[in-house]
């Protein structure tokens, strides 16, 4: 998820006949939150990176691998972004990748996590510095991780259950 000074705005309540003020920023500093969730355990792993590229994706996979329970194996759902499908990635032994069909982000539950993070903690804000962007992204993720029931609710898909 890209997070930066050109941040998203969401709806807000206002008195009838008034227009609510929403902050806006014309600067372009960004950071990227790479995150994965485990709906079954209500947890996740994430890393903030300055770019969305192969190096960042490798760091993210390594972070996920460390978060997988000992003796367990995780299947990671991914779209087909260039940094997801490059042959330059080294896949940790406790991870497998499952690629979604092209142009189908609605199949990936983590997309709903990004929407929840934006609506709940990140939208309608202006970040003064790059460090403020990083802090906000990390704080939003940590807030989410403190809510395992929310992760399970948002991330559970009927078609993703084994043994139906």
Image: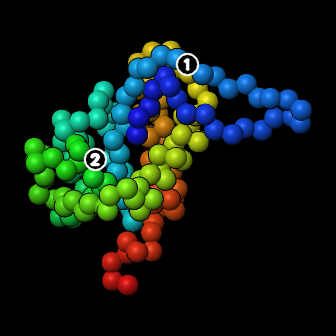
Label 2: state its secondary structure.
loop
The number of discs equals 2
**Can residue 148 be seen in this snapshot?**
no
**Number of residues whose C-alpha sits closer than 10 Å to that of mark 1, classed few (under 14), some (14–19) or many (20 or more):** few
Residue 120 location, quadrant? top right
Label 1: state its secondary structure.
loop
Q: Earlier in the sequence, mark 1 or mark 2?
A: 1
**Residue 55 versus residue 39: which sits nearer the camera?**
55
**Number of residues whose C-alpha sits closer than 10 Å to that of mark 2, classed few (under 14), some (14–19) or many (20 or more):** few
- Image-based side of 27 in relation to 70, left or right: right
Say which residue appears at 58% left-offset and 26% top-offset. Answer: 125
Q: Of the numbered discs in the image, which one, if any, rests on residue 81?
A: 2
Q: Which residue is mark 1?
A: 25
Residue lying furthest front in this view? 103
- Image-based side of 131 in relation to 68, left or right: right
Give the position of the N terminus as an image quadrant: top left
- Image-based side of 1 in relation to 11, left or right: left
Residue 39 location, quadrant? bottom left
Image: 3 above or below 129:
below
């Amino acid at each position: 998820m890209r997070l930066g000074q050109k941040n998203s705005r969401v709806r807000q309540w206002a008195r009838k006949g008034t227009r609510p003020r929403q902050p806006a920023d014309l600067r372009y500093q960004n950071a990227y939150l790479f995150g994965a969730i485990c709906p079954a355990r209500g947890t996740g792993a994430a890393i903030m990176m300055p770019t969305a590229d192969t190096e960042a994706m490798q760091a993210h996979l390594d972070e996920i691998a460390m978060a997988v329970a000992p003796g367990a194996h995780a299947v990671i759902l991914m779209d087909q972004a260039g940094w997801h499908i490059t042959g330059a990635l080294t896949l940790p032994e406790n991870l497998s990748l499952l690629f979604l069909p092209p142009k189908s982000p609605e199949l990936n539950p983590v997309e709903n996590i990004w929407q929840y993070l934006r609506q709940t903690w990140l939208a309608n804000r202006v970040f003064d510095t790059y460090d403020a962007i990083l802090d906000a992204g990390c704080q939003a993720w940590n807030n989410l991780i403190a809510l395992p029931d929310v992760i399970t609710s948002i991330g559970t898909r009927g078609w993703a259950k084994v043994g139906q």
